[in-house]
Image (cartoon, rainbow, N blue to C red):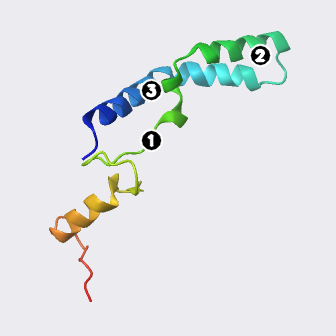
Amino acid sequence: MAKKSMIAREKKREKLVAKYAAKRAALKEIANDESKPMEERFKARLELAKLPRNSSPTRLHNRCQLTGRPHAYYRKLKISRIALRDLGSNGQIPGMVKSSW
């Protein structure tokens, strides 16, 4: 189980990303528009830099829904490989059988 503080921090980042998504997209559009004057584009870049760092979607990290584990994460299932194995062994995932030889 991951530290509760790390899980909470990741949830806080998700909220910030959602909160600033529209503003960030608008500023990026202005900053990347070649037809706008250089001063306006530069001002948009400065405004983008003033936004909280954790509001950037690249700072998000996928975590397991059950354990909070950050590594070996299956996007489709939203759980880690260890949680997947436990659920499969317990028969809680339909069609999944534990392999043995």
* 60 displayed left or right of 36: left
Residue annotated with mark 2: 41
Identified by mark 1, the residue type is: His
For the residue labelled by badge 2, is the local secondary structure a helix, a strand or a loop? Answer: helix
Q: Distance from label 1 to label 3 (Cα)? A: 14 Å
Residue annotated with mark 1: 61
Q: Position of residue 70 (x, y in %)?
A: 38, 47
Q: Distance from label 2 to label 1 (Cα)? A: 30 Å
* On screen, residue 83 above or below 50: below
Q: Identify the residue shown where x is 25% and y is 35%.
A: 4
Q: Distance from label 3 to label 2 (Cα)? A: 24 Å
Of the numbered discs 1 and 3, the one sitting upstream in the chain is 3
Along the viewing direction, whichever of 4 and 51 lies nearer the viewer: 4
Identified by mark 2, the residue type is: Arg
Residue annotated with mark 3: 18
* On screen, residue 28 above or below 65: above
* 25 displayed left or right of 44: left
Question: Are dots 1 and 3 in contact, CB under 8 Å?
Answer: no
Q: Identify the residue shown where x is 41% and y is 31%.
A: 14
For the residue labelled by badge 1, is the local secondary structure a helix, a strand or a loop? Answer: loop
